[in-house]
Image (spheres, rainbow, N blue to C red):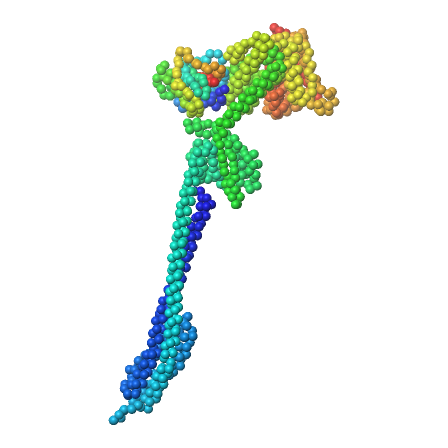
Amino acid sequence: MLLSGADRNRRLLTAAAGIVLAAVMGLVLIAGFRLATQIRANVATLQQASELEAYPSAISEQLTALRQRLDTLEYTGHVHGELDSSVRGFNRDFSALERQKGLDPAAMHAATALWTNYTPVLAKVLSYHGEPYSDTATNSSLSRSGRVFYAHVRRAELFAQANAAALHRELAVVSGSLQARTAAAASRLRWLLSGGVLAVLLLGLAAAYLQVARGRGERAARDAQDQTRDILATVREGFFLLDADYRIGAVWSQALTNMFGRSTFAGLTFEELLRDKVPPETLNTAMKFIKLLWGERAHENLMKSINPLGQLEVNMDNGRGGKETRYLQFDFHRVMGPKGVKHVLCAVGDITSSVLLARELHEAQENAHSQLDMMVGMLHSDPLQLGSFLDSASAGLKHINAILKEPARTHAEFSKKLAGLSRELHTMKGEAAALNLMSIAQRVHHLEDMLAELKARNELTGNDFLPLVLKLDELLAHLRGVREMTLKLSSLREQPSAADGTLNTPAPRLPTAGPDELASTLQSLAHRLAQDHGKDFKLALNGLAQCPPAYLGTLKDCLIQMLRNAAVHGIEADEVRRAGAKSGGGQVRVDFRRVESGFELTFEDDGAGLSPETLKEAAVRKKLLSEEQAAQLDNRAALALIFKPGFSTRNEISMDAGRGAGMDVVAKAVYSLGGRIGVSTNPGRYTRFKIALPALGETAVA
Amino acid sequence: MLREEELKTFVDGTTRYFEVAAQQPASIGSPYMLEGEPAMHDYTGMINVSGKREGVVYFTAPRAMLTVLLMKMQESDFSHESMRDLVGEVANTISGNARRDFGHDFVISVPSVFSGEKPQVSQPAGARAFVIPIHWRSHSAKLVVSLT
């Protein structure tokens, strides 16, 4: 339940009023009890004082009666007894009165003094126990002791006549003061009771007011709760609070239910919320970030910038027994309390549609850029070279599809497919790069990445080829687009054109490139390679015109690969060349000539050359050879390693080298024409390849 | 363009049928792009897809494979009708898998079955057809997915 500050104050006031009410009632009761006790004691004392007031006149009368009986010689015994009883009664009650507090002190003092003087006089009367009369035969008279007794009585009577009234008065004063005190106490009690009743009434009114106010506050709180509930049920974002144990609080927004496919969240930890929905490493990163949020010194804006959950890919049950991928955006805000971070408020948004839209937009932009790049590349390319490339790319893809179509059930059979696919793709990439068709080269490069990843697997199945075939389809579609654009460009240049270019129907053939176009392609490639790899070299081409058209395609593939190798591995960086006392720029020479047995191609660069030891180390590193096998290789066999599939001295892969498919492709192409290839080198000075091709119509054993 | 997970859904639907019905999982060969006319075996179960994607998905198998499959399912009726029912069931399982994974994005037709006669494959224009060989025991069938 949510309580506002005003509600809390009202509750505190109600509690305080209750406590004050109880305290006042307690005080009233205690004071009333004490006053009532005092009044009761006063009344008893007053009664004693009133009774005392009667004693002085009674004693006086009894003394008179005693004297008269002595005068008439009557029996005095019972009067004497009554007097004794009266004096005893006065003594008892007066002593009791003296013990009372708060009596009028002056009157009490006077009464005490009078009684103190009175007591010895009376004591002489009361102490007489003899026979007051002496009898003779004729008459009776006072006896000797009777006369003494008579004198005492007479004296006491006189004392009484002189002081009884004063004693009575003093006692009346005492009674009066007592009465006044009792009346005052009774009055105080009345005021107290009236005050108590008034206080109770006031407090009752205050309590009633607070109760009404509280009821109003509770209604407002209930309304606020209802509104909060409505907001939480309606808002599209998921909201919840995390405590210091990373547990979700009792209140959350309904949107979470749809986002996470569960109905309860209270007490769930953040880790439990995301487990099974994101990969373990993502979960681990997310938890580390959440922990950071609780740090006192963590800066919220800075934390926001490193939030790893800004766009989280989660796999959710789709409610039909399957899974679907959704994208959630987590935003965190720290709720501060007096002792630091109290909670972390998490706001979760489902951004799936915007992510997919952004992705589509990005792809569309990429496509547009790629089309533009392609257009620019094509405008700078010779249409004949372009046509030649598209024809060979189509043929390459047909071959790739044929490789895929071959039946395969075992790892070895699938693995063999990969080797064939690598060769085809590498050739295609080289040609595309040579024509500066980078969008094609990059697509092929991506396919090569996929192949490399598959090659590293210990077990291959047909499932592993599913993404590959889809990417090939993409490449095919892209090539189709390029072909269509090429045809449009051709038509603009008033050349015959045709539409379509799918795998199913034969592509319209564009004019095939000749030696001049090949030379231009190679120069263009050399220029790009020099720029991309920061090398300075010149390419000299001789005799390409002598190449028969039947060999031109293979010659192109081989020269492209060798030129890339020379640029990446052969020609050194400027500073290395200067340190090695070489002339400024590097030189790459290509010589094609007719020889007696057919044709000979020499490809030479004045770069770093090949080091047999480096080649052997690379072969061991690539696990193509064991260390023992490598140690047994002579220099010639070590140089032959460069023609092995998968061999490369580079650890990193780039667009132009590192896959180990270059010289393998060259060798395979040469062998397919019945030719031979050889390599010679002088480390630090040069690398020279010689390719011998048979005269047309002949074949040679490789 | 067809996405990998979509293709996987159709493949899983097919291999799952063998795993559940015959307690022997099927494996797939390397997929490739169809060139020319679609290659059909003796019996074909086909579903038409519309909505987010348009096209056809069909499973086509030789009689020998279906016979062994029926035997593994403890069936004794190897008639023409049983074979038709069987490819229909496989197509139905593929359809169920697609409904589970794609929901309302895909509108999938009731499977139609062909045997002997040439099926009417209404392959949408511009859609590539992918052939996925389905290997089960010593037999092979094909799953063909052609969607825009």
Image quadrant in which you'd find residue B19: top left
Quadrant, the N terminus of chain A? top left
Image quadrant in which you'd find residue A377: top right
The total number of labels drawn is 0
For the question of whether residue A545 can be seen, the reply is yes
Q: Nearer the viewer, residue A217 or A197?
A: A197
Residue at image position (39%, 53%) is A204
Residue at image position (43%, 35%) is A233
Residue at image position (64%, 24%) is A617
Task: List the single residue furthest toward the left.
Answer: A137
For the question of whether residue A399 can be seen, the reply is no
Q: Nearer the viewer, residue A365 or A61?
A: A61
- Residue A97 placement (x, y as % from top left): 38, 73
Q: Nearer the viewer, residue A281 or B62?
A: A281
Quadrant, the C terminus of chain A? top right
Q: Nearer the viewer, residue A153 or A638?
A: A153
- Residue A652 placement (x, y as % from top left): 61, 25
Residue at image position (29%, 85%) is A69
Is the residue A437 above or below the residue A225 in the image? above
Left or right side of A304 for B93: left
- Residue B70 placement (x, y as % from top left): 38, 19
Left or right side of A72 for A222: right
Task: List the single residue furthest toward the top.
Answer: A697
- Residue A639 placement (x, y as % from top left): 65, 19
Task: List the single residue furthest toward the bottom.
Answer: A137
